[in-house]
Image (cartoon, rainbow, N blue to C red):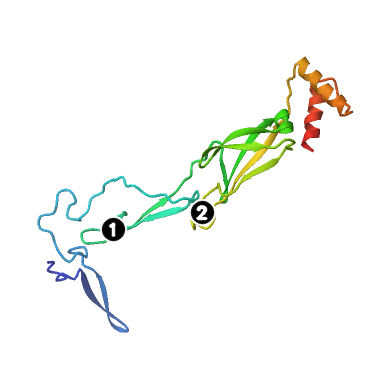
Amino acid sequence: TCQVCHGTGQVRVSRDTFLGSLITTSACGSCNGAGTIIKEPCLQCNGKGYIRSKKKIVVDIPSGIENGNQLRVAGKGNSRGSGSISGDLIITVRVRPHPSLKREGDNVVSSVDISFAQAALGTKLKIETLDGDEEITVKPGTQPETKIVLRSRGIIPLNGYRRGDHIININVKIPTNLNGEEINLLKKYAEGREETVGDGSSGFFSNLKNAFKK
């Protein structure tokens, strides 16, 4: 036990002021507020009661967590010495971007390219979702910027109220490099619909692409 503070870890100091005697309390300088003095201090901690060390721990990441959110792990922070309670560990989460899936709130958004023929005649595509690959149906006559929504296939929010959706943006790609046979087939298609077309040059397909975006 410290002989100066008698184990309290604090000392009282009296000062005379024009208002009278002023008594203040401060940490004991002899024992640094510990209340005890270690005669033979530990060689590793020098009597502080703690040492600096690193340790790996496993932390559960809840579904729906967002970039920048913080997690608190109780009792895994710094210690102030022997007998003190360790602080908490604060973890700031950084979410690594996905190569093909984008988060918008609780929704997941992705894009898929289809050809002119697939848009006109329809097709089936395999796409990546949070639950694995899934086959979707593209209906005949699908237009550019069409959206296919998979209900309740998005993010599970932190509050667990309602799962978001997976929104798939359909991009119709207009061909730019056609061979002679493909050009003739498109010309016959246009003739059957009594449409005026060009000769298959790059200018024509540029105009076709612009018209298809309208």
Classify 10 Å Cα crowding around label 2: few (below 14), some (14-19), many (20 and above): some
Name the side, left or right, on which 148 lies relative to 59.
right
Foreground: disc 1 or disc 2: 2
Q: Residue at x 85, y 20 (%)?
A: 199
**Image quarter in which the C terminus is found:** top right
Residue 204 is tagged as none
Residue 86: x percent and y percent?
28, 58
Q: Residue at x 27, y 56 (%)?
A: 79
Label total for image: 2
Residue 86 is tagged as 1
Q: Residue at x 54, y 52 (%)?
A: 163
Q: What residue type is labelled 1?
A: Ser
Residue 151: x percent and y percent?
59, 48
Distance Cα–Cα, label 1 vs label 2: 31 Å
80 or 206, nearer to the observer: 206
Task: Place residue 194 in its image quadrant.
Answer: top right
Residue 123: x percent and y percent?
66, 32
Can you say whether 102 is above or below 41 in the image?
A: above
Going from N to C along the chain, the mark reached first, 1 or 2, is 1
- Residue occupying the far top of the picture: 180
Which element carries disc 1, helix, strand or loop? loop
Residue 157 is tagged as 2
61 or 162, nearer to the observer: 162
